[in-house]
Image (cartoon, helix red, strand yellow):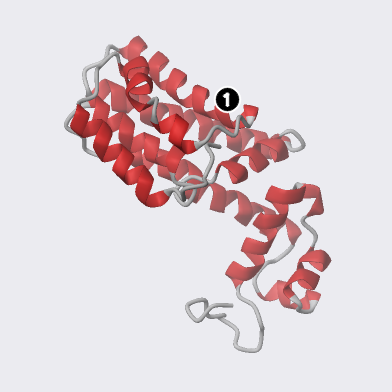
Amino acid sequence: MTETTVSRYPQTKVSHEDWLNAALAVLIDEGVERVKIQDLARTLDVSRSSFYWYFKSRQDLLDQMLWRWLDTNTAAIVERAARPADSIVQAVLHVFECWTDDAVFDPRLDFAVREWARRSEAVRRVLDDADAARVEAIRRMFARHGYEATDAFVRARILYFMQIGYYALDLGEPMETRLSYVEAYVRGFTGVEPTTEEAAAFRAFASAVVPDDHSGA
């Protein structure tokens, strides 16, 4: 536990965040079936009973994991799509930040939740609602910049579903290669040619957040 992560209960070794982060790591690496209280306790080197300081049950933990995903991945797309922008190019590049910075949008967590949804109708409903909210946020972005209603909706779906499909295919394309296509991607999604300054500003952002050896998700 870091100095900035303080347990609400001094008698416990780990915090609520420690339990939640450990569970999310298992979800990503092994799937929801492997998220088990005893195994998490062993990983955290604490007693199973300490789990109940923070969670009512395993289901409570699973619910909070799902909310964490919503509060990070879905919120990131919705927030960036709503950001003020002088042009549709800038607006789309704001959304591209989600696909560039794993600290903003975690593709591995997104994929893990999609796998989880295959096994749970309740999670499937949450996932469907989240996808709809993401597409709607991007649709509104296009509409604000003057796109006709159907055009805005279809462009939003193309932009969003293309990226989700990219993750599903796990292409492993180096980020340097992806960034070389920025102008073409923007042109394809918007029908507008980005300026040299707009493309350069996005590449500068990407260079600041992506390690040299990072590959596209």
Is residue 67 visible in the rendered image? The answer is yes
Estimate the x, y position of residue 59 in percent, counting from the top left.
Answer: 72, 55
The 10 Å Cα crowd at callout 1, few under 14, some 14 to 19, many 20 or more, is few
State left or right for residue 107 relative to residue 135.
right
* Badge count: 1
* The quarter of the displayed image where residue 113 is located: top right
The quarter in which the N terminus is drawn is: bottom right
Q: Residue furthest toward the bottom?
A: 11
Q: Amino acid at mark 1?
A: Gly
Look at the picture and state if 1 lies above or below 30. below
> What residue is shown at x 80% (from left), y 60% (from top)?
36
Estimate the x, y position of residue 165 in percent, counting from the top left.
Answer: 58, 25
> What residue is shown at x 37% (from left), y 43% (from top)?
206
Look at the picture and state if 46 lies above or below 72. below
Estimate the x, y position of residue 84 in percent, counting from the top left.
Answer: 21, 38
Secondary structure under the numbered disc 1 in the rendered image? helix
Look at the picture and state if 215 lies above or below 34. above
The quarter in which the C terminus is drawn is: top right
* The quarter of the displayed image where residue 2 is located: bottom right
Which is more toward the observer, 196 or 100? Answer: 196
State left or right for residue 51 relative to residue 158.
right
State left or right for residue 139 relative to residue 125.
left
The residue singled out by tag 1 in the image is 165
Estimate the x, y position of residue 39 in percent, counting from the top left.
Answer: 82, 65
Which is more toward the observer, 30 or 48? Answer: 30
Is residue 81 visible in the rendered image? The answer is no
